[in-house]
Image (cartoon, rainbow, N blue to C red):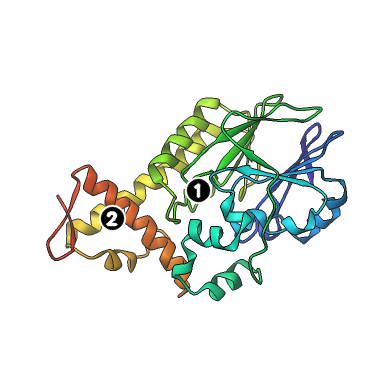
Amino acid sequence: MEEIREGVWFVAAENRGKYPFSNSLYLEGQKNILIDTGTGSFLKDLSAKTDQVVLSHYHRDHVKYNHFFKAASFSIHSADAPGVESEQGFYRLSGLDNVNVQEYWNMVGQSDFGPTKIDTYLNEGDIIEHDRFKIRVLHLPGHTPGHCGFLIEDYNLVFAADLDLNRFGPWYGNPGSDPEQFRHSINRLRSLKPEIMVTGHSKPALENIDQKIADYAAIIDQREESIIEYLRKQPCTLDQLVDQKIIYRRQYEQTALRYFEKNMIHKHLESLLKRGIAAKTEQGLYEAL
């Protein structure tokens, strides 16, 4: 753990924050708050002194060790709550009932789904009570419908969860994910001009934050350009585009990753059709206009 500001601790995840782990933020005071539980099994050491666990969203790499915190209360945005409250809700939000489920659980290093009882449902602008800090809920959808960041107003510090700064870029592979909402959430984050930005899978950013966010956002446009470029060469089906591995450079022959790639490519295609940049032929082929 690293104290990045007085009373605010960055908890670096195992495997350098790479999936299926994620970084956490720990806020110390008379009431101790942990944001996300995907960091590693060592979080068990914090379980006895953590009063509240706040979840940024329902993805398994951010809720992996919820079961350690039996005495803590749990909070999450209402739109993502079904994804942790029941197995049925998780599969509905994630769409993973369309793939080899056991393969998915193996990929995330978990044996199966374990439900979490939610005590408080978060919404945009809520203030999370704490004796030392003013913690404001930022609803930042796109990654998931209920994806949230958290602004520690005392330090102008944002925990942005999976609005990340990694080289992979924005991820919007679930049925309810939305790249356009993601763009809006990125723009909103930039407008806040945070002095410190902590994310789920990157080291804390302390300088050049706006440029780093802009570079991250540009990856959405780069993917779109790659799709258009391929369609200019020849009309093709959605599956043929997925075969190009535009988003996941390697799919490791895993059905879950191919499923996510297909969802993301399809969302780009729908946007291109809507804007008149691409068309769909009677034969079901996509072509650039």
149 to 24, vertically: above or below: above
Q: Quadrant of residue 199?
A: top right
Residue at the spot x=49%, y=47% of the render? 143
- Which comes before the other along the chain, label 1 or label 2? 1
The one of 75 and 140 positioned closer to us in this rendering = 75
Residue 250 in view of the camera: no
Graded by Cα atoms within 10 Å as few (under 14), some (14 to 19) or many (20 or more), the crowding at tag 1 reads: many
Please name the amino acid that badge 1 sits on: Thr
Residue 27 image offset from top left, x and y in percent:
77, 37
Residue 267 image offset from top left, x and y in percent:
34, 52
Q: Which residue is mark 1?
A: 144
Please name the amino acid that badge 2 sits on: Ile
**Left or right side of 44 for 221:** left
Q: Looking at this rendering, what residue extends furthest in the top direction?
A: 154
Residue 95 in view of the camera: yes
**Left or right side of 5 for 207:** left
Residue 273 image offset from top left, x and y in percent:
22, 48
